[in-house]
Image (cartoon, grey):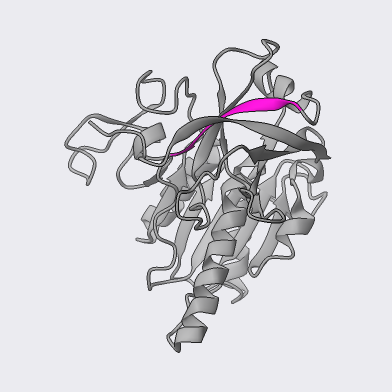
Amino acid sequence: MPAPPPDAQTQLAELISVEPCGTDGVLLRLRPEAPVTQDGAPLAPNRFFMLRREDGLSPAIPRPFSIYREVPTEGDGPADLVFLVKVIGPGTRALAESAPGTFLRLIGPLGLGWPDLTTPGDPWVFLAGGIGSAPFFMAVESLTRAGDAAEEAGTEPPAAPYLLYGAATAGLVYDVEEFAELDCSLHVATDDGSLGFRGNVLQLLDRLIADGLVPERLRIAACGPLPMLRAAQTWAAARDLECWASLEELMGCGVGICNGCVVETVPGSELGSWPNVKACVEGPAFRCDTVVL
């Protein structure tokens, strides 16, 4: 039976700041009491943490959030952790209304993150839908670090990724100015045309390929609403392309006990020897030909 990752821990973290982001989001910056990695290496992108308030003013069950950014601090202290939170219910609202200087419960890092994005192959196209952009900031950073290391070693660096960021309207494209500073080819789409391309991210991808701005052979990593993930799964399967989806499942524990985040597997696939997997300990990212979305 899959178990939580060995580096997972529970501790308190001081809330350093709460900044508005978009029309309904906030950036929570937390300073953990102890480093969240034992060797000091950067966290793998798309790992997640469970967060909750400790003063009884939020639901007892913590909420899962992908790590968005790590920010180094002065001295030898642990890096600050930044979470991009969309305020949609009592749990997220309680976190967003927390005052700087208070302490939150921090459980993690959890999950397996993305697959190794630095393996040789076709370039990655990251498809982000709304708050589904959260696991991609550090994904781009990881490819940048790998590229720098390859150049120093005199080896071929991985290709810089493409990031296609879509949302219903401009106010739901969170922190796009920071994404624009990353080493990636950023393209934005909104359903209403209020920012960037008018349409969804797959329509945008088709346009970019037709215009010769994105190659036809590529690998996809997607995170966003379920209809978007299903569309990406279908789009990639029709072209025999590798496609991964990071699932936003409901979780009560994050460590494989509550069975609240089970995902059906595809019979005969790599995961199909068992009828389901748990997104918290075997995900949250899955290759799209192994799970039923």
* Above/below status of 157 relative to 63: below
> In this rendering, would 151 be left or right of 91?
left
Q: Position of residue 29 (x, y in %)?
A: 72, 40
Q: Extreme top residue here?
A: 56
Q: Is residue 1 magenta?
A: no
Magenta stretch, overall SS: strand
Where does residue 108 sit, x and y in percent of width and height? 49, 36
Look at the image and tell me in which quarter the C terminus lies.
top left
Q: Nearer the viewer, residue 10 or 90?
A: 10
Name the quadrant containing residue 6: top left
- Quadrant showing the N terminus: top left
Residue at position x 22%, y 45% from top? 269
Residue that appears at 52% across and 67% down: 143
Q: Residue at x 42, y 51 (%)?
A: 244
Q: Position of residue 151 (x, y in %)?
A: 51, 84
Residue 103 falls inside the magenta stretch? yes
Disc tally is: 0
Extreme residue in the bottom direction: 154
- Place residue 24 in its image quadrant: top right
Q: Is residue 231 left or right of residue 60?
A: left
Residue 13, position as x, y percentages in the image: 64, 33
Q: Is residue 206 above or below residue 19?
A: below
The answer, for residue 68, to whether it is visible in the render is yes
Over which residues does the magenta segment extend? Answer: 102-110
Residue at the limit of the structure toward the front, as seen here: 75
Against 287, is 197 above or below?
below
Q: Image quarter for residue 120? A: bottom left
Front residue of 50 and 196: 50
Q: Residue at x 46, y 34 (%)?
A: 9
**Is any atom of residue 206 visible in this view?**
no
Q: Is residue 206 left or right of residue 55?
A: left
Q: Is residue 220 left or right of residue 203?
A: left
